[in-house]
Image: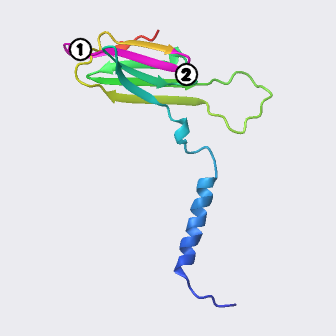
Amino acid sequence: MQLVRYNPLRDLQRMERDLDKFWEDDWGLLPSLADSTTMDLYEEDGKLVAELSLPNFTKDEVKVTTDEGVLEVSAEHSEKEEGKGKRRYYFRESSNRYLRRVKLPEGVRIDNTEAVFKDGVLRVAMPTTTSPKIKAKTVPIK
């Protein structure tokens, strides 16, 4: 047996190679930043507008609520397996969830909130004037 001089850097280099290999593998375990949903919040024509991109969701799967100055958008989509097909899946996501809460600035009236869902984009518009406090409200989506 041949003796090899101990080099502590060799262990660090091996760990670095192992970590590089781990991050190069795409196992589908970690969501990428490209998969995250975007949200814009801006003021337009006396209204505070929130626009969210919610691809692969339908209007019935999205819920918008306002409570104590917080806008909450949630969505849940579950696929049901119908019958046995000839497809052979190697990877399939069967459910998708989304939840986003945003604190609203002072002076937003949540009693006249309107929400429209079209082409995978949710647009929530709230008038920006002073109003008495309203406890909670579920917003219907058109």
What's the magenta region? 118-137
Residue 127 falls in image quadrant: top left
Q: Is residue 44 left or right of residue 32?
A: left
| Residue that mark 1 sits on | 129
Kind of residue at disc 1: Thr
Callout count: 2
Residue 104 falls in image quadrant: top left
Kind of residue at disc 2: Phe
Can residue 133 be found in the magenta stretch?
yes
Q: What residue is rendered at 37% in x and 15% in y?
A: 125
Vertical position of residue 94 compared to residue 29: above or below: above
Q: What residue is rendered at 37% in x and 19% in y?
A: 49
Q: Is residue 86 left or right of residue 19?
A: right
The 10 Å Cα crowd at callout 1, few under 14, some 14 to 19, many 20 or more, is few
Q: What residue is rendered at 59% in x and 54% in y?
A: 23
The x, y position of residue 39, in whole percent, is 44, 28
How far apart marks 2 and 1 lie (CA) works out to: 32 Å
Q: Which one is closest to the eye, mark 2 or mark 1? A: 1
Mark 2 falls on what kind of element?
Answer: loop
- Disc 2 and disc 1 in contact, CB within 8 angstroms: no
Q: Is residue 84 left or right of residue 34?
A: right
The x, y position of residue 119, in whole percent, is 56, 17
Can residue 98 be found in the magenta stretch?
no
Q: Which mark is residue 57?
A: 2
The 10 Å Cα crowd at callout 2, few under 14, some 14 to 19, many 20 or more, is many
Q: Residue furthest front?
A: 45
Q: Is residue 82 left or right of residue 129?
A: right
